[in-house]
Image: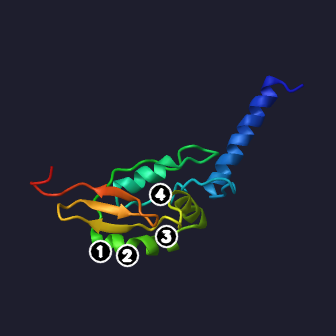
Amino acid sequence: MTSPMGTRKFLHRLAQAEKALQDQSVFSPDCICFPPNEPPFFCFPIEADVASSVKCSLHGERFKAQFHVYVAKWYREKSAKVLRDRLSAQHQKAWLASFPPALWPAEEEEIQDGRIFLRLRDGTRLLAFPPRGKNAQ
C-alpha cells in the first residue's frame, strides 16, 4: 500500500517530468496542440474559430486565443505556405488537424459589398470578413 506522502512525491515527480518534456517540446503522438513557442497565425477570425473548435484528446484547448489584427491580402497570399513550411512538425500536425488538405486551403471570394468569403474545396462558403466601409450594414 502506498502512503499519502509517497503518492504526493510521485505526483510531484510526474509533474516535473511533464514540464521537462514540454520544455523540450516533446509531444505525445496523439497530441494535436500547437507548441507554446509557435502559436498559430490566422489571416481571418473565422480561421481561429475553426481551429479552436478542434480539441486535443489529451489536453482539450490547443492554443490560447489572441486578438486578431487585420492581415493584408498580399500577405495572406504569401504567408500561408511560407510560414507553415518553416514551423515545427508539431505545429504542422496541429494545423492539419484543424485545416485538413481535403478542404483547405480555401479560396478567397470578395463580393462587391466588401464581404470576403472563404470557399472550401468541397464548395462550402464561410464568411471570413464582414462588409467594410461606412455604407456597410
Q: Could you say which disc has been placed on residue 1 in the image?
A: none
Could you say whether the residue bearing mark 3 is in a helix, strand or loop?
A: helix
In this view, the residue farthest toward the front is 123
Side of 119 relative to 131 (left or right): right
How far apart, in angstroms, are the residues tagged by discs 3 and 4? 11 Å
**C-alpha distance separating marks 3 and 2:** 11 Å
Q: Nearer the viewer, residue 85 or 135?
A: 135
Looking at numbered disc 1 in the image, what kind of residue is underneath it? Trp
The residue closer to the viewer here, 36 or 43, is: 43
User: Distance of mark 2 from mark 1, alpha carbons?
Assistant: 7 Å
Q: Name which residue type carries label 2.
A: Lys
Q: Are marks 2 and 1 in contact (CB under 8 Å)?
A: yes
Mark 2 and mark 4 lie on one chain; the one further toward the N terminus is 4
Circle 4 residue: 39
Q: Which residue is labeled 3 in the image?
A: 84
Circle 1 SS class: helix
Cα–Cα gap, marks 3 and 1: 16 Å
First along the sequence among labels 3 and 1: 1
* CB atoms of marks 4 and 1 within 8 Å: no
Q: Is residue 118 left or right of residue 2?
A: left
Residue type highlighted by circle 3: Arg
Q: Give how far across and how far down residue 4 sits, in percent.
A: 79, 24
Q: Is residue 111 left or right of residue 55?
A: left
